[in-house]
Image: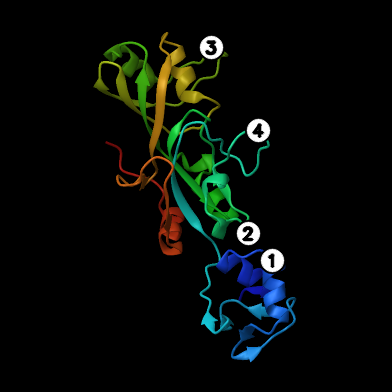
């Protein structure tokens, strides 16, 4: 049973500002279970009550789960006065929900990013205790060799003395690799390659646990996943290692 104000319900589900929704309600354009309701503070049961606006039934999604192929130059934040955020890339229909990015990607890092308004899902999905795999494609400014692969597997010691968990490195090309980590330290992959004198030119996240970036999702585009899929990710977020 989900209790929610009528104006908030319509605003969240239709992507209309709360002030506009209130005017529509006061005009008698909203009904709950076929009864006109002019009180925008009316409390309804979102799971059971049928809400209509101008005769059109409004479906109910308690939470939204979005996969975005994050572009460069955009920050993982809900609001920033100087830079464009991932929330700014979403259409108006999502702006009335309290959406936030799950975890972070650097401003110049691209790839898979999850955005939601479900705090419980976010906490469960990226909990450090679960050691969820994160897979990245890395373009470097130098040649990768088997010694680097072995060093990553043994656990890199960063320049500040931090010892990282074992990471998998798959050499794809001379200066291109796939790196899989189970931690999320600050600028971790860049710092890992820094210990062997290599700089990262491009960094792209392709997977988190069992959740992969759709191949047809272009840079800057997004898609929704169902609440059922999100629940499955919470229950079993891991992915079989390659």
Upstream in sequence: badge 3 or badge 4 = 4
What's the residue at 62%, 73% (across, down)?
A: 2
Q: CA distance from mark 1 to mark 2?
A: 8 Å
Above or below for 97 versus 33: above
Residue appearing at x 73%, y 80% in the figure: 26
Mark found first going from the N terminus, 1 or 2: 1
Q: Nearer the viewer, residue 216 or 187?
A: 216
Q: Which residue is mark 2?
A: 96
Look at the picture and state if 96 lies above or below 187: below
Q: Earlier in the sequence, mark 2 or mark 3?
A: 2
Q: CA distance from mark 2 to mark 3?
A: 44 Å
Up-down: is 51 above or below 190?
Answer: below
**Mark 1–mark 2 CB contact (< 8 Å):** yes
Q: Quadrant of residue 205?
A: top left
Q: Position of residue 164 (x, y in %)?
A: 48, 23
The residue closer to the viewer here, 81 or 224, is: 81
Q: Which mark is residue 18?
A: 1
Q: Which dot, 2 or 3, sits closer to the camera?
A: 2
- Per the model, the C-alpha gap separating discs 3 and 4 is 31 Å
Q: Which residue is mark 4?
A: 82
> Residue tagged by mark 3?
159
Q: Are marks 2 and 4 in contact (CB under 8 Å)?
A: no
Q: Crowding near pointer 2: few (<14 within 10 Å), some, many (20+)?
A: some
Dot 3 falls on a residue whose secondary structure is loop
Q: Quadrant of the C terminus?
A: top left
């Amino acid at each position: 049973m989900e209790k929610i104000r009528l104006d908030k319900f319509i605003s969240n589900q239709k992507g209309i500002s709360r002030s506009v929704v209130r005017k529509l309600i006061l005009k008698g354009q909203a009904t709950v279970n076929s009864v006109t309701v002019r009180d925008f503070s009316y409390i309804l049961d979102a799971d059971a009550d049928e809400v209509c606006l101008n005769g059109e039934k409004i479906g109910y999604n308690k939470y939204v789960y979005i996969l975005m192929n994050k572009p460069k130059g955009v920050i993982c934040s809900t609001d920033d006065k100087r830079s464009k955020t991932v929330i700014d890339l979403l259409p108006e229909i999502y702006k009335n929900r309290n959406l936030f990015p799950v975890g972070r990607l650097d401003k110049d890092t691209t790839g898979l990013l999850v955005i939601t308004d479900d705090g419980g899902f976010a906490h469960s999905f990226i909990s450090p205790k679960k050691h969820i795999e994160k897979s990245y494609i890395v373009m470097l400014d130098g040649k990768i060799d088997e010694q680097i692969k072995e060093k990553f597997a043994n656990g890199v010691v960063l320049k500040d003395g931090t010892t990282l968990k074992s990471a998998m490195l798959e050499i794809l090309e001379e200066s291109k690799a796939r790196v899989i980590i189970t931690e999320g330290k600050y600028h971790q992959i860049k710092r890992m390659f820094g210990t062997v004198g290599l700089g990262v030119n491009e960094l792209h996240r392709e997977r988190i646990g069992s959740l992969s970036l759709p191949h047809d999702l272009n840079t800057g585009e997004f898609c929704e996943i169902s609440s059922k899929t999100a629940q499955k990710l919470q229950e079993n977020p891991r992915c079989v290692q390659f």
